[in-house]
Amino acid sequence: MPNKTPSAPRCVALVGPYLAGKTTLLESILFATEAIPRKGTAKEGNLTGDSSPAARARKMSVEVNVASTTFMGEKWTFLDCPGSIEFAHEARSALMAADAAIVVCEPTVERAMTLAPLLKFLDDRQIPHLLFLNKIDDADIRVRDTLAALQAVSARPLVLRQVPIREGDTVTGYVDLISERAYHYKAGQASDLIPMPQTMAEREKEARQGLLEKLADFDDKLLEQLLEDTVPSKEDIYSHLARNLAADRIVPVLLGAAERDAGVRRLLKSLRHDVPEPSVTAARLGLKGAAPLAQVFKTQHAAHTGKVSVVRVWQGPIADGATLSDGSNSAKIAGITRLMGNAVTKQAKAETGDVVGLLKLEGVATGALLSAKGDAAAPAGESVGAWPAPPQPIFSLAVNAEKRGDDVKLSGALHRLSEEDPSLVVEHNADTHELLLWGQGEMHLAVAIDRLRSSYHVPVVSQAPQVPYKETIRKGVTQHARHKRQSGGHGQFADIKIEIRPLARGSGFNFEEKIVGGSVPRNFIPAVEDGVRDYLKRGPLGFPVVDVQVVLFDGQYHDVDSSDQAFMTAGGLGMREGMPKCDPVLLEPICKVAVTVPNEFTSRVQRLVQTRRGQILGYDAKAGWPGWDEVSAMLPQSEMHDLIIELRSATQGVGTFGWTFDHLAELTGKPAEKIIASRRPAEEKAKVAS
């Protein structure tokens, strides 16, 4: 490769599916650059990445890990991102701070589909990225077959940089298609330069021609050279490659085996020459503002330092003690730290391109663009630089503090958790009176609950949330209610006549009065309505009542014994006696669901929805997603709790859905009887507690 001027500190994100080997690759990179003296392993629990208790317990990445190093005199920061789709928002936030991404994947055809959502995000955001085919030493299929499967899920052309050298069933090295040099892998060390094997000559020539032809698609001069059978110089090829990578026109593909350190140093050299400068990335993102300029891409709360805002410095320097603003909040930096897994080192300032932790920037959220005056501008809308919105939550658990008296502590801990991870949402459900924690799946919430215990010392109990059933009536009734009580002194007296009527679905509640002749004084009428409304919180079936009209049309009062309280009691009594006569019926919430899947799974998803009492409305090609469908359906909310678990299982983990409440529908028969019966013990328990 040609020599180059040392660059400003650059940042690369390691992304890819679960178990692809991203954290192992990070460990190998740090070892190859002498940032660590020896490599850790997941088994020993001493990896630089996956340093949190939750990650080590599960032997998987559950958050972005930051590690800095140097290579050939240049500073680099690597962001090891979780591979599970449940933590995708964490990975996407890190990608917004990166100059480029390494997509780590296994050389298999079967798992190619798992890369589709990630590759689409990279292309939509025009983030330069390359593929690292990991575990190539044990690959039992041809690289060209893997590339064909991967190309089917990539909108950008894949450009093979290397071809493997095989000895029997094992890949022992590679040929670089630009330098036309052959290398032999050497565990734990740089690969040895070896003579080009005679058996590789034809394959190397064919693959190199393919590389040049793909580059020629973006340069007329190179195309003319190829048509004239003129061989371009290696320097020109390197230049074409770097330019097209930076513009996200192509995706170079390199080979290796991170566990054996195979191909890692060659990967680092490619990064050194091809990854754009921070200034190029800032321009791509459309970030504007005078120095200092930095953007928060991760927020965390540490036990000893408090809030840490992890930022990419787009224009430096930023000095310790400086005041930064996001336009709404200003805060003084209480310290600057260099991050290396779970280890931190204080430093006096941060330069352009650095990734550092800024301490105690209270009020500053993830995604905030910081400057001295708060006048920095970040793009919005559909721009590539617009901060990605958190995905809609699709899985929830009802949570309660394990210990009485920890409710306030739990509330604060949940607030900090959702500040760290905006894809976690906390909701107080008004219908079921439950505290709900929403997220992207079972693992996502399990990790959050573990962190409540380990990091915030708030153990919680969790359970599936209640479905917010309602009830209504099918027919009307006229009801007379009298409340009369004598207890020395003033008594209580109220007499009312009401008509209870069903309303159209979705009408809610309506109260009217048609009193003639002052049979109920006007000042007592609001009290009757209050009594009626209070009853509607729990009807004869045990659920909130909706779509009912109550008309007060007659009554009696006493000059001395009538009061607001008496008429309120009479209103509730009339409802309690009249509602069971109105043929009450259970209502269940029905949601409109849009399921997004590759079209090869569409029929499978339709069957899945139908087994959950869903009604298929239709399906169509998903706009902007070639090869994907969107299945529309109506689905009872009671069938949605674990839908995402089964959906991902049926679609290699890539299926997802969005939903909105649509309407309430009658539920009768044994399903309704079972729900009503299960409600009664809860009612009895509530009565005892009160």
Image: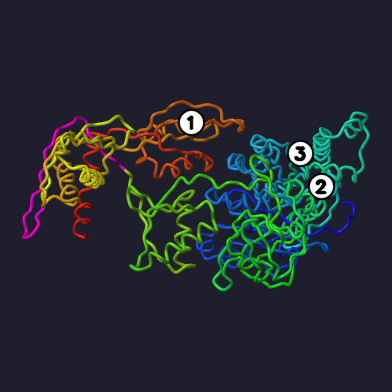
- Say which quarter of the image contains residue 328: bottom right
The question of residue 558 being in magenta is answered with no
Q: Position of residue 445 (x, y in %)?
A: 46, 54
Q: At which x and y percent is residue 49? A: 62, 62
Q: Which residue is mark 3?
A: 249
> Measured from the top left, where is residue 594 in percent x and y?
48, 34
Disc 3/disc 1 C-alpha distance (Å): 31 Å
Q: Residue at x 35, y 49 (%)?
A: 430
Instruction: Please name whichever residue, 229 or 592, is drawn nearer the observer in this view of the structure.
Output: 592
Does residue 471 show up magenta in the picture?
yes
Q: Which amino acid type corresponds to the residue marked 2 in the rendered image?
A: Asp
Residue 225 coordinates in the image, percent (x, y): 92, 33
Magenta-highlighted residues: 469-492
Dot in front, 2 or 3 = 3
Identity of the residue drawn at 63% across and 70% down:
343
Q: Is residue 36 above or below residue 614?
A: below
Look at discs 2 and 1 and give the one toward the viewer. Answer: 1
Please say whether residue 182 is visible from this viewpoint: yes
Q: Which residue is mark 1?
A: 631
Residue at 77 percent of width and 56 percent of height: 290
Q: Amino acid at mark 3?
A: Arg
Indicate the quadrant where residue 468 lies. top left
Q: Which mark is residue 176?
A: 2
Kindly state the secondary structure of the residue where label 2 is placed.
strand
**If you read the primary sequence from the N terminus, does the residue marked by circle 2 or circle 3 appear first?**
2
10 Å crowding of disc 2: few (<14), some (14-19), many (20+): some
Left or right of residue 123: residue 530: left
> What amino acid is labelled 1 in the image?
Val
